[in-house]
Amino acid sequence: MERFPTTLTEVQFGPMKLFKDPLQVLLVFAKEDSQSNGFCWACEKATFRCSMARTPESALECFLEKHHDLVIIDHRHSRHFDAEALCRSIRAVNSSENTVIVAVVKRPDREEASVMPLINAGFNRRYVENANMMACYNELLQLEHGEVRAQFKLRAGNAIFTALEQSQEAIEITSEDQVIQYVNPAYESIMGYQQGELIGKEIIEVPKSEKNKPDLLETINSCIRKGKEWQGIYYAKKKNGDSIQQNVKITPVIGQGGKIRHYVSINWPLNDNNKSDKTSERVQAESQTDIQSSKHKDRRKGSLDVRSTTSRGSDGSSQRRHSSMARIHSMTIEAPITKVINIINAAQESSPMPVAEALDRVLEILRTTELYSPQLGTKDEDPHTNDLVGGLMTDGLRRLSGNEYILSTKQPHHIPSHLITPLSLNDIPPRIAQTMENEDSWDFDIVNLEAATLKRPLTYLGLKIFSRFGVCEFLNCPEATLRSWLQVIEANYHSTNSYHNSSHAADVLHATAYFLCKERVKQSLDPIDEVAALIAATVHDVDHPGRTNSFLCNAGSELAILYNDTAVLESHHAALAFQITTRDDKCNIFKNIERNEYRTLRQAIIDMVLATEMTKHFEHVNKFVNSINKPLAALEENGGNSDEENVKSILTSPENRILVKRMLIKCADISNPCRPQELCIEWAGRISEEYFAQTDEEKRQGLPVVMPVFDRNTCSIPKSQISFIDYFITDMFDAWDAFADLPNLMQHLDNNFKYWKGLDERKLHSLRPPPE
């Protein structure tokens, strides 16, 4: 029995309109009965095309011919044929992938049977026998508008994926959690990956190009998470490490629950051949060799033809500059420093010779890598400053040594049993609570708290400060979790270090909290920035061995090898902090925050901890001054504070917020010279003792002595403090004070500098003058 209606059904599939023929239904019943008749009538009423088969063989033959949308198999009588075996046979046919197969089963006599055997055989659902014609008709309608329509859309999806596979544009689809779910062959080819290599990876696992602005990813994510489309220029990093400039369009796709379920990214690599060719035409003096080099720019990744570079004779300074200009213009590198060099080269073209020669000297300076580090005089001029710079701003002498320094103080990274105490804000001992009464004052005495807490100030002060800033509420974590976290972090600081112990961490946390309350800082930072700053301050020196990076590199320590002699300790502090936090739910303060928020918070914490490394000290300070202090000062000079919008844009731009956070933790980290005099003297003694101990060990192990002036028998502590303040502190705190308004700190700094100067003028080497 067959009917062939011709009505087409329209189905909406996203932006696509799909038209399908009436359903093709195959009924497989060994004998005619009321149930088979019910489905035949229902198919006729629904105007579906219906075929009937009596045996498995004829059913399979019929399916191979017509590829039905829906197959209904009688599963009630096993003596006629094996329904499950027939279902498996149909499923073995490739074209059955989008076919819905239903089993008609007996009404259960007693207990309800499991559907798992049916599902394992390949059935989509079951129909409990009911010969009522309307029941059969309703079942078909539900199937049509449910499973069958879903399968029809999936079938159409195959056509869409075929289009994606053939597309010349690079296409990437990620899930709501930014896990890569699909990339087309064009994407894999352009980026240099093997088929399927990227599927299942998180976006953060894929290497990023350094050519993008630091805040670009944050800007993109902020846009697309709001459901908005983002389009712009983005540098992607290929598998081989090369960067490729692309025009990128990212579209969020709304799915179930009205939420974003996928992100579709379409990428067009930018071709610079036209630009290079036009540039070559403009430059008349360029040799044919250079023009060829320019034309092949994309393929050769911007390398210059060695022959053309070296074959230029001394045809006069002007021709040399002109030729140099041509080569720079033909490059596609767009780093800011390259743009600056291009501008200077252009200015040289029309400048008098003295100006051109001066600009040549400027170019020589700009092409060095140490743009932010002041150049010191000879070693004899200031050995203290020279040693401090050598010890704090380099990663060692990089020489091989027979000695391998293994961290002898490797602590178990857990909470010692004697530290697990029932502690909350409500049951802090009165003596400790009294010591912390003025913790919001800059003159707060952390040394008193250290004594009152038996060298556990970080847990107690952390509980109070984190409570004041509402950190538990922000992280949605119980106070007990925060308490456990503070305890385990504090347990991983080395109490045997004279300086880099949990008291220093508590001191930096206190300074961080103090700075966060300053009006300008509050205007600049968001709540997530404040939480990141407090956490970063707490963990910024965790597991510090009491030795400098230079020492660890020279000693060939495990950490130096792990981190390639680069920001060794700071990388270790950040990595260990997250390891400790996330491996145990009892102290995982991040457990209850949303995934994307966690990523943002984690990125900010890591960036702040790494900013405490001194090799980039002057870079951070100069960027802060040039990007924030100077623009704000210019606005004030041009009309007071009336231009609130411009002030706000300077303070709250993503890149400037990063600079503020870096400057904040840097100032907090080395704020000892700005503390009241007794605290300043105490910290100076502690850091000196730690450096003395390092020098002692370097001599014992036959390692290079990184800071020779820190010999406990000859060192002048006042001289070392004067050099430290002159070289590192004064400029940085002048800039920070101009931003955050800190007159009390600057007064302490002035008093302390005069104190050390007074001792030095009396040729004293000690922390304090001798008793009268």
Image (spheres, grey):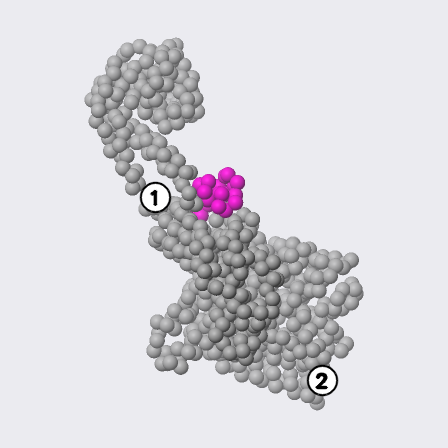
Magenta extent: 175-200
Q: Which mark is residue 388?
A: none
Judge whether residue 431 can be spotted in this image: no
Of pointers 2 and 1, the one earlier in the residue sequence: 1
Which residue is at a point 65% across and 59% down the rendered structure image? Answer: 565
The label nearer to you, 2 versus 1, is: 1
Badge 1 element: loop
Judge whether residue 749 can be spotted in this image: yes
Q: Which mark is residue 255?
A: 1
Q: Amino acid at mark 2?
A: Leu
Task: Determine whether 47 is above or below 718 in the image.
Answer: above
Residue 729 spot, x, y in % from top left? 58, 76
Residue 422 spot, x, y in % from top left? 54, 58
Determine if the magenta segment contains residue 486. Answer: no
Q: Which mark is residue 764?
A: 2
Residue 192 spot, x, y in % from top left? 52, 45
Q: Residues within 10 Å of mark 1 (few under 14, many from 20)?
A: few
Looking at the image, which is closer to me, 591 or 320?
A: 320
Task: Determine whether 541 is above or below 712 in the image.
Answer: above
